[in-house]
Amino acid sequence: METDILKTDRRSFLGDSLLGAGGLLLAWQINPARLTAKPLRPVQPENAAMISVGRAYLDQTPNEANVARLRQLLNLAAEVSALTLPAPEKERLAVRQSEDFRTGLTVLVQGWVLSRTEARLYALAALQAEAGAAVGHA
Amino acid sequence: MIIDFRTVTQDTVIATDICIVGAGAAGIAIARELLGSGVKVCLIEGGGLEYDPEVELLNDAENVGEFTLHLEYNRARFLGGTTNLWGGSCAPLDAADFEERPWIPDSGWPIGRTDLEPYFGRARPYFQLSDYSFDPQDCTREVPELARLRLPVQGGDITEKIVLRSPRVGFGQVYRPDLAAENTNLTVMLHANGMRLETDEAGKTVHSLRIGSLDGRRASIQARIFILAGGIENARLLLLSDQPNPAGLGNEYDNVGRYFCDHLNMTSGRVLIQGATDFVRFYDIEGLYDHTNPTHEPVIVGLQPTPEAQRREGIGNYLCFISETYEGEDSAGFLALRRIIGRIKRWRNPTDFTHDFATVAGDFADAVKGAYGYFVNEAPLRLYKLHHFSEQVPNRDSRIMLADTVDALGLRRMRVAWNLTPQDKHTVVHAQWLVAREFGRLGLGRVEIEMAGDDDPWPASLHQSSHYMGTTRMSGDPRKGVVDANCRVHGMTNLYVAGGSVFPTGGGGMVTFNIVALAIRLADHLRAELA
């Protein structure tokens, strides 16, 4: 039953297409009660990973450590969170990732070859999460 | 029949039509092809029927190059030669490997893939290969499982190359009945080492080969034709034969021993793949070594840059295999991610993130795996290692010479200078980038590159493939090679060379299979010449 609740929450949070690493990550035994008890949306494992990769990208590309600039580079509206992209935006960026790889617009982050688009999306996620965490802590 | 040279009378002169020096893949293939031909063939082998550590000491060589070539234990001096050790991988050279590639100096064979094509077919039975095609499209039809498990990499910069697995046919064991048969035109003489070729005064025709054994026995073989089939020893024997030319036979243009090359072999980087969990059965280099499992498919698929991509990037040929699941779920990085999640959920002190982010960065694959999971669907994501197999481009300064010290036969040992060029590293670096970009473009996954730039150091895992090539390279121009298109030494009337040493470039093929194809071709040529 807990698993069902979690799946429902994931659908609303990430959309139907985001169960890729879900099977593995369910093993993390995230408590669903905690997921619904917090005022802000819960952070899923994928999000934590995005934040980690995004932080690494920002460390090597500090001139992009700016939410507004990253939104502009990604052509994302101000109200959109990198951690909760609407499905159409996600599809658009997925296509853009593929195009990045085709045209060689790639970046090496900690040895991994990523598209510039995904690296920037993760960077935006990192900045947003860090800002949110700071506000929450205050 | 098989005889032991140590039972032959001292200083005997043995007369034959064709003398083959070295009973490895090339020598045994030529001898078998000439069975029943009506010409007397004498095949000599420095070792015996089995491994003998005293004999193997003759393999010792000096290393003076950038990298160490371990010749002492990656060769075998007994009947069958290095087929007693090999891994069983079989794949023909690509058509593009034979062509002159302007971006690779000294590339180009005087023959093409079409010249060898019929001999590939005749080589297959030597390796007990299945009937599967070397063409990935055909192979998909022949092996229905492959269609399901195949990665969809067609149409871009990366293509597939089929490698068929031989059950590690040891030529010395499998073909011993043929070699040992009585009343044939073939004599195999064990414990007979080639020591020096002796020629006429002009140095154009070899009239005899001086041979010796470790117990001090010496003799000579006189023949109409001599074939050197001793792998890396071919160049050494030419250099040891320093009369009348002190530089050695066939060495008018100082090419003997030069251009030594191998296939560069290394495990480096990882790949995160979304796909069938068992796809790796066809891409896993480890399958090449699993000869104990009869259910394993006899097909391995390597990924390689297309000829067009090789040209555009200015690189040599390259193959990449995917191997071994990396189970990182219990790693420090994974556990750190769990802590980050917990803290974000509870909005605890963000400064605590620093250590865990650093930990994740230290095991960054987990983070990439998780982040990529944001975009993928239901197929599982798994991490694998990448195994690289890369062509070493021709380099005059990578070479075999004679050392000042001597071996137990009193012959000058081999001195090896195995040297790579910047283009060798460029090949591995840029081929990896091509693979990484294709994986990204096609949505197959993400690739980690350990050696990402031409200035990065070689991975510590870099090692030899023991494909000893180039030192008697084939060329239509005597100034640029040692043997001609028929494997005859330039400037010599009756001296031929067989084996990997005649390869001017190693390309993307597996060497033994191509050696045997060339050997069969040479046998046909000699049959015609002697008819």
Image (cartoon, coloured by chain):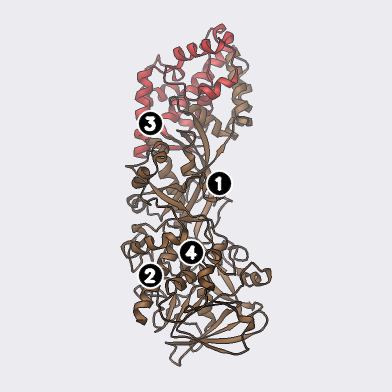
Question: In the depicted view, which residue is nearer to us: A35 or B381?
Answer: B381
Q: Where residue B293 is drawn, which disc sits there?
A: 1
Q: Earlier in the sequence, mark 4 or mark 2?
A: 4
Q: Amino acid at mark 3?
A: Gln
The 10 Å Cα crowd at callout 1, few under 14, some 14 to 19, many 20 or more, is few
Q: Position of residue B349 (x, y in %)?
A: 63, 17
> Which quadrant of the rendered structure holds the N terminus of chain B?
bottom right
Q: Position of residue B45 (x, y in %)?
A: 56, 75
The 10 Å Cα crowd at callout 4, few under 14, some 14 to 19, many 20 or more, is many
Could you say whether the residue bearing mark 3 is in a helix, strand or loop? Answer: helix
Question: In the depicted view, which residue is nearer to us: A23 or B370?
Answer: A23
Hue used for the chain lettered B: brown
- Residue hosting label 3: A97
- Residue hosting label 4: B261
Q: Let me know if marks 1 and 2 both belong to one chain.
A: yes
Q: Amino acid at mark 4?
A: Cys
Hue used for the chain lettered A: red
> Which quadrant of the rendered structure holds the C terminus of chain B?
bottom left
In this view, the mark in front (1 or 4): 1
In this view, the mark in front (3 or 4): 4
Q: Let me know if marks 4 and 2 both belong to one chain.
A: yes
The image shows residue B130, relative to residue A104, as above or below, that is below
Q: Chain of mark 1?
A: B
